[in-house]
Amino acid sequence: MEILEGAGFPSRGGAPSCSRPASRHFFTGCTACSELWEWVDPHLSIPPFGGAIQNYSKRRLTAPGQDALIQGDRLPRKNCVKPSKRQNSRSRIPARQRLGVTPWIIGCVATETRLRACARNAPANCDWLEVRLDRVGLCGGQWHDLCAAAQAAGRPVLLTIRAAREGGAWKGTEAKRRALLLEGLTSVAAVDLEISTKTSDPVIQAAHAAGVQVVGSFHDFKGTPSLKVLQALECRGRDRGADVIKIATHVRSAADMARLMALPALAQGPIAVLGMGARGAISRVALPCAGSCLTYGALDTATAPGQPTCRELAQELVRWGARVSANG
């Protein structure tokens, strides 16, 4: 959802809302189907409605960092937002361990050797494991059982297969990637899917049916978009059914860092925000203190620019009061 500016109404009357209106009068539009909504103050108990409007324009996000201008004179009556059905009661892990409850440290598994080690013993200094199957490989067909064993050893598993165009190492077909994600739903607690990948919708639906959480992610390895774009990306991910939104961008300036720091307080639900690069390194500790629900650390090889080790993260988060020491 994005804010529209219409003649006769205040511009930018509130933050974008994915599932509910803000407390001021503004217009929103769906980036998926271009349907538009008019919202009024909900405290007046007036529902969304359609009507004739002249001389308004809408800026629709068509690609990260790009805007397209759409003009019209009528607001459709139908809302296109389809909130996902959460299957919390079917989750394979206790509610207290689910993503979004507290700032968790995610230990990134990037090699077959590390995955096999995690299947034997849960690593220290992390709460979850992210198995980067695009880097680990299929382990001779044993990856599925190794993920299940790692989870049984005490660390919930987040399965990620990131394509090369998304900054990952997967070079196979989209159909094969989707099939692997669907297969993994029986042995992991969550899956990571890029917000921009529309072909992942069947995986989202199957994940929710299986009690598996969905992380909807966005990565920009070149810079940090405007706050308006970042908020629109969050809403796009929630509209598609993500339980947790992950936004990771390259930090080049203090202004970039300020935008990332503002996101958790403005978010419509659980969100993980990370800064990449040398200037973004501090965000791995600062953002969990500001409300980001996940931070990622390396167990072996870093999987993103500026990524610290899980041990370093644990020590710093304890130091800044965002994590309880294992020693009490």
Image: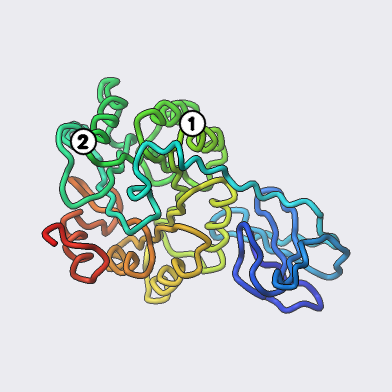
* Amino acid on which disc 1 is placed: Glu
Percent of width and height locating residue 203: 50, 34
Percent of width and height locating residue 72: 82, 61
Q: Write the residue at 16% across / 63% down.
A: 315
* Amino acid on which disc 2 is placed: Ala
Secondary element type, mark 1:
helix
Label annotation for residue 174: 1
Q: Write the residue at 53% across / 42% down.
A: 197
In this rendering, the label closer to the viewer, 2 or 1: 2
Task: Place residue 61 in its image quadrant.
Answer: bottom right
Q: Write the residue at 15% across / 37% down.
A: 121
> Is 56 situated above or below 136?
below
Label annotation for residue 149: none
Task: Place residue 157 in its image quadrant.
Answer: top left
Viewer-closest of 27 and 171: 27
Residue bearing the label numbered 2? 153
